[in-house]
Amino acid sequence: MVQQNPPGGAAHKSDPEIAAADGLFQDDPAQPSAQAEASPVLPSGSGDVFDLVDSPGSDEGAPASTSAAPETASAPKAAPARPREAPARRAEDRSRREPEVLVEEVWSRQAEWGPTLLVLAAWLLAVLLVLYFTWGNELYAIGFFAFLIGGAVAVVLSYPILITLERPVRITPEQAVRDFYAALSHHVPHYRRMWLLLSTAGRITAAYGSFEGFKAYWIERIQALKGSQAGPMTPLVFEVADYHGDKSAGQSRVEVHFTLKIFIRGRRQDGPIASLPAQLALVRGPDKMWYLENGTLPRAGSAATADRR
C-alpha cells in the first residue's frame, strides 16, 4: 500500500529549499550591519564628522570618509597663526614708546652751539694772527683796522648764540611747540635749534632728510610767505594761538591742536599774513623733554601731520 504524503508534508519538505532561497536575500541587510560595525572605528569628533561618515556608500568609500575626517578635525590647528601677530604688534608698540627710539638725539648746548663756536674760534684765531704780524712789524694802523673788522665779524658770527641764550625748557608739549616756532622769529632763524627740537620721525619727510635739506626747506617757505609784502631782512613772527592738547602726565606721545598765526614784524596791526590750523604729535625724549614729530609748515586748511612735503 503506497503511503501518500499529506498536503502539509510537501510544504515541510520544501521548507529547506525556501529557507535556502531566503538566504540569498540575506546578503543585502548584512552590508549595513558591516558598516555599522566599522563605524565605531572612526575617531570621536563633532556631529558634522559623523554626518559625513554615515552617508550611504560602498565599502571602498568608507576608508575615504575615514581619512577625510582627520583632515577636517585638524583644519582648526592652522588658526593659532593669528594670535601670534598680537604679541609682535604689542612688542613693536612698546619699542615705539622707548624714549631712545623716539628721540635719537636730544637737545644740548654742545649740539646747538658747537658748529657756531668752531667757526667763531677759527675766525678769532685768524684775527689774532693778523694782529700779531701787523703789530710785530709796527703796522699799528693796519692792526687797529684789523681789530675793528675782526671784532665786528665775530659779533655777526656769534649771532646764533646771542639769540639762543635762553634755554628751551620743554616740560610741557605747549612749551616745545612755542620754542620751535620762536626760533623762526628772528632776522636769521635758528634752524639748528629747530632741528634739535624734532624727534627721529620728524627728521625724515618727503621734503627733507637731513639738516641741510631742512634748512633749505624753511628758507623757501619763509620766502614764499613774505612774497612782496616784506623785504629779505624783515623777520616774520610766528605765534601759536588757540592751543589744545592731551594731558601729558605719564604719556610718551600726545596729540595737540593749535593755530599758527604769522605776522610781519613791525606790522602786527595789519593782522596775520597767514593763519594755519595745525595738528601734530609730540613725543617725550630720554631727557624728559618734548619733541615734535613734524617739522614742516602746516598747509592752509589741513593738518600738519598730513603735511609731509
Image (cartoon, helix red, strand yellow):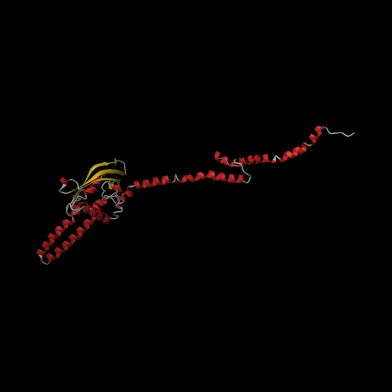
Residue 271: image quadrant is top left
Q: Residue at x 18, y 61 (%)?
A: 125
Q: How many marks are shown on the rendered structure?
A: 0
Outermost residue toward the right in this view: 1
**Foreground of the two, 30 or 5:** 5
Outermost residue toward the left in this view: 141
Q: Residue at x 81, y 32 (%)?
A: 7
- Residue 55 vs 165, above or below: the answer is above
Q: Position of residue 148 (x, y in %)?
A: 12, 59
Let me know if residue 172 appears in the view: no
Let me know if residue 260 appears in the view: yes
- Residue 15 vs 166, above or below: the answer is above
Q: Residue at x 27, y 56 (%)?
A: 213
**Foreground of the two, 184 or 72:** 72
**Foreground of the two, 18 or 172:** 18
Q: Residue at x 32, y 49 (%)?
A: 102
Outermost residue toward the front in this view: 7
**Foreground of the two, 183 or 276:** 276
Which quarter of the image is occupied by the N terminus? top right
Q: Position of residue 111 (x, y in %)?
A: 25, 53
- Judge left or right: residue 1 versus residue 156: right
Q: Position of residue 178 (x, y in %)?
A: 23, 46
Q: Position of residue 287 (x, y in %)?
A: 28, 47
